[in-house]
Image (cartoon, rainbow, N blue to C red):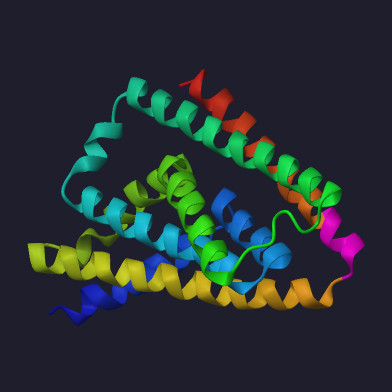
Amino acid sequence: MSYTALAAGVGFGFLIAAQVGPIWILALRTGIQAGFAASFGIGVGAAIIDTIYCVLGALGAAALLATPNSQRVVSITGSLAIAYLGARSIIRTRSKKKNPEELESSTTETFLRSLRLSLFATAANPFTIISWVALLAAASTYIHTTIEKVTFACGVGVGSLTFFFALALVSAQLGKRLRPLLIEWIDRVATALFFIFAVALAYRAFTI
Protein backbone atom coordinates (compact mmCIF):
# COMPACT_ATOMS: atom_id res chain seq x y z
CA MET A 1 0.00 0.00 0.00
CA SER A 2 1.25 3.48 -0.83
CA TYR A 3 0.90 5.54 2.33
CA THR A 4 1.73 8.66 0.34
CA ALA A 5 -1.25 8.05 -1.95
CA LEU A 6 -3.48 7.32 1.06
CA ALA A 7 -2.40 10.47 2.91
CA ALA A 8 -2.82 12.56 -0.23
CA GLY A 9 -6.29 11.11 -0.74
CA VAL A 10 -7.35 11.90 2.82
CA GLY A 11 -6.07 15.46 2.51
CA PHE A 12 -7.65 16.10 -0.87
CA GLY A 13 -10.92 14.47 0.20
CA PHE A 14 -11.12 16.67 3.28
CA LEU A 15 -10.33 19.85 1.33
CA ILE A 16 -12.85 19.12 -1.43
CA ALA A 17 -15.57 18.38 1.12
CA ALA A 18 -14.74 21.61 2.98
CA GLN A 19 -15.46 23.76 -0.08
CA VAL A 20 -18.62 25.78 0.44
CA GLY A 21 -21.16 24.60 -2.11
CA PRO A 22 -24.68 23.16 -2.32
CA ILE A 23 -23.87 19.91 -0.47
CA TRP A 24 -21.91 21.72 2.25
CA ILE A 25 -24.86 24.07 2.77
CA LEU A 26 -27.31 21.15 2.71
CA ALA A 27 -25.36 19.28 5.40
CA LEU A 28 -25.06 22.37 7.62
CA ARG A 29 -28.72 23.33 7.26
CA THR A 30 -29.87 19.75 7.83
CA GLY A 31 -27.79 19.40 10.98
CA ILE A 32 -29.12 22.63 12.45
CA GLN A 33 -32.72 21.67 11.69
CA ALA A 34 -32.78 17.91 12.18
CA GLY A 35 -29.69 16.95 14.20
CA PHE A 36 -26.56 14.83 13.82
CA ALA A 37 -28.01 11.71 12.16
CA ALA A 38 -29.66 13.68 9.36
CA SER A 39 -26.56 15.75 8.64
CA PHE A 40 -24.24 12.75 8.82
CA GLY A 41 -26.48 10.94 6.34
CA ILE A 42 -25.81 13.80 3.92
CA GLY A 43 -22.09 13.43 4.60
CA VAL A 44 -22.01 9.67 4.06
CA GLY A 45 -23.78 10.06 0.72
CA ALA A 46 -21.36 12.79 -0.33
CA ALA A 47 -18.34 10.68 0.69
CA ILE A 48 -19.62 7.70 -1.31
CA ILE A 49 -20.09 9.78 -4.46
CA ASP A 50 -16.73 11.53 -3.95
CA THR A 51 -15.03 8.14 -3.83
CA ILE A 52 -16.86 6.86 -6.92
CA TYR A 53 -16.07 10.00 -8.91
CA CYS A 54 -12.45 9.80 -7.84
CA VAL A 55 -12.21 6.21 -9.09
CA LEU A 56 -13.92 7.09 -12.38
CA GLY A 57 -11.67 10.11 -12.82
CA ALA A 58 -8.55 8.08 -12.13
CA LEU A 59 -9.68 5.61 -14.78
CA GLY A 60 -9.93 8.38 -17.36
CA ALA A 61 -13.63 9.23 -17.23
CA ALA A 62 -12.78 12.93 -16.82
CA ALA A 63 -12.14 13.02 -20.58
CA LEU A 64 -15.90 12.66 -21.09
CA LEU A 65 -16.30 16.25 -19.85
CA ALA A 66 -13.91 17.66 -22.43
CA THR A 67 -16.62 18.67 -24.91
CA PRO A 68 -18.93 21.70 -24.55
CA ASN A 69 -22.03 19.53 -25.07
CA SER A 70 -21.15 17.22 -22.17
CA GLN A 71 -20.40 20.20 -19.93
CA ARG A 72 -23.73 21.73 -20.91
CA VAL A 73 -25.62 18.55 -20.01
CA VAL A 74 -23.85 18.32 -16.65
CA SER A 75 -24.61 21.97 -15.85
CA ILE A 76 -28.30 21.68 -16.75
CA THR A 77 -28.68 18.46 -14.75
CA GLY A 78 -26.94 20.04 -11.78
CA SER A 79 -29.07 23.17 -12.03
CA LEU A 80 -32.27 21.11 -11.90
CA ALA A 81 -30.99 19.00 -8.99
CA ILE A 82 -30.01 22.03 -6.91
CA ALA A 83 -33.27 23.82 -7.75
CA TYR A 84 -35.01 20.70 -6.44
CA LEU A 85 -33.15 21.11 -3.13
CA GLY A 86 -34.45 24.67 -2.89
CA ALA A 87 -38.02 23.69 -3.73
CA ARG A 88 -37.86 20.77 -1.30
CA SER A 89 -36.64 23.10 1.42
CA ILE A 90 -39.61 25.43 0.92
CA ILE A 91 -42.14 22.57 0.88
CA ARG A 92 -40.75 20.91 4.01
CA THR A 93 -40.62 24.20 5.90
CA ARG A 94 -44.27 24.90 5.12
CA SER A 95 -45.29 21.34 6.01
CA LYS A 96 -43.48 21.58 9.33
CA LYS A 97 -45.24 24.84 10.18
CA LYS A 98 -48.67 23.35 9.41
CA ASN A 99 -48.04 20.05 11.16
CA PRO A 100 -44.83 19.92 13.28
CA GLU A 101 -45.25 16.20 14.04
CA GLU A 102 -45.65 15.18 10.39
CA LEU A 103 -41.91 15.16 9.63
CA GLU A 104 -40.83 13.38 12.82
CA SER A 105 -39.21 9.95 12.32
CA SER A 106 -36.73 7.57 13.91
CA THR A 107 -32.98 8.20 13.81
CA THR A 108 -32.47 5.39 11.29
CA GLU A 109 -35.23 6.66 8.99
CA THR A 110 -33.83 10.19 9.21
CA PHE A 111 -30.32 8.96 8.36
CA LEU A 112 -31.48 6.87 5.40
CA ARG A 113 -33.67 9.66 4.02
CA SER A 114 -30.73 12.06 4.15
CA LEU A 115 -28.43 9.44 2.61
CA ARG A 116 -30.75 8.96 -0.38
CA LEU A 117 -31.09 12.70 -0.88
CA SER A 118 -27.32 13.18 -0.69
CA LEU A 119 -26.54 10.41 -3.18
CA PHE A 120 -28.88 12.04 -5.69
CA ALA A 121 -27.78 15.62 -5.05
CA THR A 122 -24.03 14.95 -4.93
CA ALA A 123 -24.05 12.73 -8.02
CA ALA A 124 -25.86 15.42 -10.01
CA ASN A 125 -23.80 18.28 -8.60
CA PRO A 126 -21.38 19.56 -11.29
CA PHE A 127 -19.30 21.33 -8.63
CA THR A 128 -18.33 17.86 -7.39
CA ILE A 129 -17.43 16.67 -10.88
CA ILE A 130 -15.44 19.81 -11.75
CA SER A 131 -13.57 19.66 -8.43
CA TRP A 132 -12.45 16.09 -9.06
CA VAL A 133 -11.28 16.80 -12.59
CA ALA A 134 -9.00 19.55 -11.24
CA LEU A 135 -7.96 17.52 -8.20
CA LEU A 136 -6.91 14.47 -10.15
CA ALA A 137 -4.70 16.62 -12.34
CA ALA A 138 -3.05 18.03 -9.20
CA ALA A 139 -2.72 14.58 -7.62
CA SER A 140 -1.11 12.93 -10.64
CA THR A 141 2.25 13.11 -8.83
CA TYR A 142 1.02 10.69 -6.16
CA ILE A 143 -0.95 8.14 -8.18
CA HIS A 144 0.49 6.06 -11.01
CA THR A 145 -0.28 2.37 -10.49
CA THR A 146 -3.73 0.81 -10.10
CA ILE A 147 -3.03 0.09 -6.42
CA GLU A 148 -2.12 3.73 -5.83
CA LYS A 149 -5.29 4.89 -7.57
CA VAL A 150 -7.47 2.62 -5.43
CA THR A 151 -5.60 3.66 -2.28
CA PHE A 152 -5.96 7.33 -3.18
CA ALA A 153 -9.71 6.89 -3.78
CA CYS A 154 -10.13 5.17 -0.40
CA GLY A 155 -8.28 8.05 1.22
CA VAL A 156 -10.60 10.51 -0.50
CA GLY A 157 -13.61 8.74 1.01
CA VAL A 158 -12.06 8.83 4.48
CA GLY A 159 -11.14 12.52 4.19
CA SER A 160 -14.57 13.51 2.90
CA LEU A 161 -16.34 11.49 5.59
CA THR A 162 -14.12 12.99 8.30
CA PHE A 163 -15.06 16.52 7.31
CA PHE A 164 -18.78 15.81 7.13
CA PHE A 165 -18.68 13.99 10.48
CA ALA A 166 -17.20 17.12 12.05
CA LEU A 167 -19.71 19.35 10.26
CA ALA A 168 -22.58 17.15 11.48
CA LEU A 169 -21.36 17.45 15.08
CA VAL A 170 -21.01 21.23 14.86
CA SER A 171 -24.29 21.83 13.05
CA ALA A 172 -26.22 19.60 15.46
CA GLN A 173 -24.84 21.55 18.42
CA LEU A 174 -25.71 24.84 16.73
CA GLY A 175 -29.26 23.58 16.25
CA LYS A 176 -29.55 22.98 19.99
CA ARG A 177 -28.17 26.39 20.96
CA LEU A 178 -29.58 28.79 18.38
CA ARG A 179 -32.92 30.50 18.80
CA PRO A 180 -35.79 29.27 16.58
CA LEU A 181 -36.00 32.62 14.78
CA LEU A 182 -32.30 32.49 13.84
CA ILE A 183 -32.67 28.89 12.65
CA GLU A 184 -35.58 30.00 10.48
CA TRP A 185 -33.44 32.73 8.91
CA ILE A 186 -30.59 30.28 8.31
CA ASP A 187 -33.07 28.05 6.50
CA ARG A 188 -34.20 30.98 4.34
CA VAL A 189 -30.62 31.92 3.44
CA ALA A 190 -29.76 28.29 2.61
CA THR A 191 -32.84 28.02 0.39
CA ALA A 192 -31.94 31.25 -1.40
CA LEU A 193 -28.38 29.98 -1.97
CA PHE A 194 -29.71 26.77 -3.53
CA PHE A 195 -31.63 28.81 -6.10
CA ILE A 196 -28.64 31.12 -6.69
CA PHE A 197 -26.42 28.10 -7.42
CA ALA A 198 -29.13 26.68 -9.71
CA VAL A 199 -29.45 29.92 -11.69
CA ALA A 200 -25.66 30.24 -11.96
CA LEU A 201 -25.41 26.73 -13.38
CA ALA A 202 -28.26 27.31 -15.82
CA TYR A 203 -26.53 30.48 -17.01
CA ARG A 204 -23.25 28.60 -17.37
CA ALA A 205 -24.97 25.89 -19.44
CA PHE A 206 -26.09 28.40 -22.05
CA THR A 207 -22.83 30.33 -22.20
CA ILE A 208 -20.45 27.40 -22.73
Q: Position of residue 176 (x, y in %)?
A: 78, 76
Q: For residue 175, what is the image quadrant?
A: bottom right
Residue at image coords 21%, 67%: 142
Q: For residue 32, what is the image quadrant?
A: bottom right
- Above-or-below relation of 19 to 73: below
* 182 part of magenta stretch: yes
Q: How many labels were placed on the picture?
A: 0
- Above-or-below relation of 73 to 55: above
Between residue 19 and residue 31, name the one nearer to us: 31
Magenta span main SS:
helix
Residue at image coords 61%, 73%: 36
61 horizontally vs 196: left or right: left
146 horizontally vs 136: left or right: left
For the C terminus, the quadrant is top left
Q: Is residue 194 visible?
A: no
Q: Is residue 176 visible?
A: yes
* 9 part of magenta stretch: no
For the N terminus, the quadrant is bottom left
Q: Which residues are magenta?
A: 179-185
Q: Position of residue 139 (x, y in %)?
A: 27, 61
168 horizontally vs 77: left or right: right
- Above-or-below relation of 42 to 122: below
Q: Position of residue 19 (x, y in %)?
A: 54, 59
- Above-or-below relation of 55 to 65: below
Q: Position of residue 149 (x, y in %)?
A: 17, 63
Residue at image coords 26%, 41%: 62
Residue at image coords 89%, 69%: 179
